Amino acid sequence: MRVGSFVLAAQFPGQGEGEALHRAIRSAEVAEESGLDTVWLAEHHFVPYGTCPSAVTLAALLLGRTRRIRVGTAVSVLPTTHPVALGEQAALLHVTSGGRFTLGVGRGGPWVDLEVFGAGLEAYEKGFPESLDLLVRWLREPSVAAQGERFSFREVPVVPRPSEALTDAEGPEVVIACTSPASVRLAAGRGLPMLLGMHVGDEEKAEMVALWRKEARAAGRSADEIDGAAHVSAGVCQIADRRQDAAEMLLKAMPGWLKHGLESHVTVDGRARQMRDPLAYTELLCGLHPVGTPRLCVDRLAATSERTGISRFALLVEGSGDLAATEENVRRLGAEVLPHLR
């Protein structure tokens, strides 16, 4: 089992953007010191829900500041960028870090981002499969040409080639954020592992893993490839000597952040959207994920892994909104939880 932190660079009420980003960077540095396996970085545009607009850029900074820990994006929003540009960045990080970079990508949402970056609603609604296939080809082949609906260009060489990294891997790992059966099928058909969201519990995640395995077999993926797929479960982690204290810390801080952050999303086409109740959502997260004593956290992570077959975790550790509390949370995760999971 591999356990990592999930970093949104969340801007809590009363905080500046610089404070949120500093906490994100510092929590990643402490994650390496504490023995965590991976730091997963979120990407958002124009909202305080997350103040990092480029997960690959922040990944580059953290890969330069660390020596052992893996760094992944969770996720880079593919419809708002050119897949070749993102592929070049991923290849660069893969080669220069010695293979410590993982590229997580997702479809994002129908947000105003699509207008600002010129992608349009079509890129979100229909263009993700084409972009994903072009991206994966860029990371696996020596040269690439395209004749698609969105992208068409002559054959060009891939520079730098990901295979130049000093690892046995053919290129950076690619993970797909999956929130629906359609996205699960998309990932399975390409043999790519899934990143499953923190808003769903073990039962639904187990169903998504089962669907992925079924669809991967139907697509002709080998048994070894299917059995070796390392899916990732996103969640929340807050450690305290009493479960009540851990939950109260999150219930005090997270609803204000969620309300302010989620309300700031603007749809590109004016469509109506329904936002979760921030307090009820925080309570749900506390019930689903490792929030409580170290022993409870161990048991809950082990149970999720057993029920779902998922072997990797990306845990939101900044739910308190406080730098010192976040650092302590990460250190306790490394010292009091990880040793019991390995």
Image (cartoon, rainbow, N blue to C red):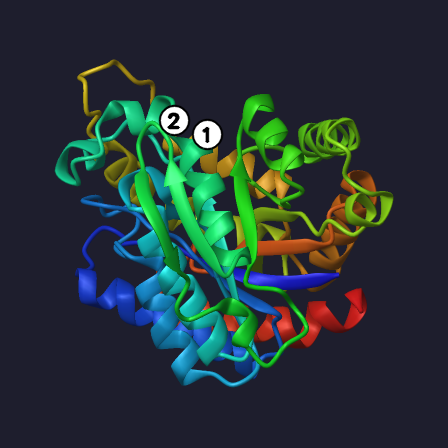
Lateral position of residue 89 relative to residue 173, left or right: left
The foreground one among 53 and 275 is: 53
Image position of 138 with respect to 81: above or below = below
- Disc 2: which residue: 277
**Seen from this angle, which residue lies furthest right?**
223
Measuring 36% from the left and 64% from the top, which residue is drawn there?
89
Quarter location, residue 128: top left
**Seen from this angle, which residue lies furthest left?**
116
**Seen from this angle, which residue lies furthest top?**
272
**Residue 60 can be seen in this image:** yes
Where, quadrant-wise, is the C terminus in this rendering? bottom right
Instruction: Count all numbered tags in the image, as a single digit.
Output: 2
Is label 1 in contact with label 2 (beta carbons under 8 Å)?
A: yes
Give the amino acid type for the residue marked by disc 2 in the picture.
Asp
Residue 70 place in picture, x, y as percent = 55, 71
Where disc 1 sits, the SS reads helix
Quarter location, residue 165: bottom right
Where disc 2 sits, the SS reads loop
**Circle 1 crowding by C-alpha within 10 Å: few under 14, some 14–19, many from 20:** few
Residue 185 place in picture, x, y as percent = 62, 27
The foreground one among 25 and 124 is: 124
**Residue 245 can be seen in this image:** no
Image position of 3 with respect to 136: above or below = below
The foreground one among 165 and 257 is: 165
Give the amino acid type for the residue marked by disc 1 in the picture.
Ala
- Disc 1: which residue: 280
Residue 163 place in picture, x, y as percent = 56, 70
Where, quadrant-wise, is the N terminus in this rendering? bottom right
Lateral position of residue 24 relative to residue 114, left or right: right
The foreground one among 17 and 58 is: 58
Measuring 71% from the left and 52% from the top, which residue is drawn there?
230
Label for residue 94? none
